[in-house]
Image (cartoon, rainbow, N blue to C red):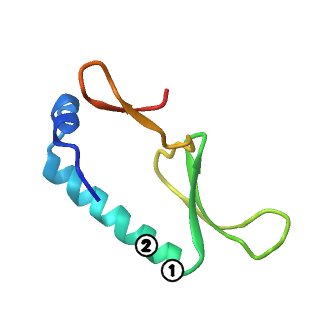
Amino acid sequence: MYVNEDECEAAGLDPEEVKRIATGLSRYAKKAEALGLQIFGGTGTGSLRFDDGGPGKLVVAEIEGNFDGGDGGSTASKGGLLRGEC
């Protein structure tokens, strides 16, 4: 887990608060993975899914919050800040 401080500054966010959130999400993502769960996001909703071998993964929980299911790609902009896909 790594916090991009320049990007936090550009967004007007406290890097320490971003770090706390990222650390917690990383911790829970690892716990989910250990149980065979996948955190899925798309069209603004989130869910926990489990592959039981059936036709599509079981949706075992819905997650509140804003989730994006993009490919996760990112690149440095002309100004040198890291930006995700549009």
* 26 shown above or below 11: below
Which quadrant of the figure contains the N terminus? bottom left
Q: Residue at x 28, y 63 (%)?
A: 23
Q: Considering depth in this image, is 80 or 49 the residue closer to the camera?
A: 80
Q: CA distance from mark 2 to mark 1?
A: 6 Å
Farthest residue in the right direction?
55
Query: The disc labelled 1 sits on which kind of residue?
Result: Ala
Name the element at disc 2: helix
* 37 shown above or below 79: below
Classify residue 52 as left or right of residue 85: right
* 83 shown above or below 15: above
Q: Considering depth in this image, is 58 or 86 the residue closer to the camera?
A: 86
* Residue 12 x %, y %: 17, 32
Q: Residues within 10 Å of mark 1 (few under 14, many from 20)?
A: few
* Residue 19 x %, y %: 21, 55
Q: Residue at x 39, y 32 (%)?
A: 75
Q: Residue at x 16, y 47 (%)?
A: 15
Farthest residue in the top direction?
78
Classify residue 55 as left or right of residue 26: right
Numbered circle sitting on residue 55: none
Q: Residue at x 76, y 76 (%)?
A: 52
Query: The disc labelled 2 sits on which kind of residue?
Result: Lys
* Residue 2 x %, y %: 25, 54
Q: Which residue is mark 2?
A: 30
Q: Which quarter of the picture shows residue 77?
A: top left
Q: Are marks 2 and 1 in contact (CB under 8 Å)?
A: yes
* Residue 64 x %, y %: 49, 54
Q: Which residue is mark 1?
A: 34
